[in-house]
Image: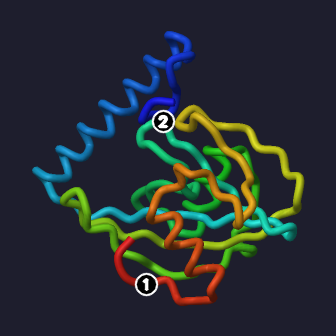
Amino acid sequence: MSGWAHGAGATAVERLLDGWYAVSHRLVALAWRIAGPTTVGVKVLVTTPDDQVLLVQPRYHAGWSLPGGGVHRGEPVDAAAVRELAEEVALVVDGHDLRLLGVLANLGEHKNDYIAMFHVEIAAGTVLTCGRELAGAAFHAFAALPESTTPATRRRLAEFRGSEPMRGPW
């Protein structure tokens, strides 16, 4: 598998999508360097009673991570978390079931980004449907995460499992 979502066996359309997401991600990073805006995002740690965690594989960066995304202007962070789960994996959750775990800062890549981290538990066996931004989405056992799980995701999962407060840099 290549560094992006699809490897050598990818169709032309999949390679085109991967390339588009990679280029657009780099253009956004360049805009952050120039303009330096403050952004707010959400991540949602979705678990099941049988000790599984939902991980997604975005087309715009390598590795498995937690679902989430940006908060729209005027949108409450819990509403953004609900929206992102629906957009990314067609998962419908009630905002009242979300639990805020913490707010973290992502200051890498010349960003001034703040991430509200939520947790929600859903029923085991829930069926997922990948949105267009994702190359994959799946439930994984905490004890058997994919090798390509991002370091930031591994840190958040370790904090969650250890009942440590989530704070500090992303």
Q: Amino acid at mark 2?
A: Arg
Report x, y in % for residue 82. 64, 60
Q: Farthest residue in the bottom direction?
A: 164
Query: Is 170 positioned to the left or the right of 66 in the image?
Result: left
Q: Residue at x 34, y 74 (%)?
A: 105
Between 27 and 93, the one nearer to me in the picture? 27
Q: Which mark is residue 65?
A: none
Residue tagged 2: 59
- Circle 1 sits in a helix, a strand or a loop, which is it? loop
Residue pointed to by mark 1: 167
Vertical placement of 134 versus 113: above or below? above
Instruction: For mark 2, give the secondary structure.
Output: loop
| Residue 137 point in image, percent of width and height | 66, 44
Residue at the top extreme? 12
48 to the left or right of 136: right
Residue 99's x, y, as percent?
Answer: 66, 79
Query: For the point 72% across and 70% down, which residue is it?
Result: 120
Marks 1,2: beta carbons within 8 A: no
From mark 1 to mark 2, how far is it between C-alphas?
Answer: 27 Å
Q: Residue at x 60, y 48 (%)?
A: 56
Q: Position of residue 51 (x, y in %)?
A: 80, 68
The amino acid beneath tag 1 is Arg
Work out which residue is located at the far left of the displayed protein and give it.
34
Rendered image quadrant of residue 50 = bottom right
Q: Which of the image's four quarters has the C terminus?
A: bottom left
Of labels 1 and 2, earlier in sequence is 2
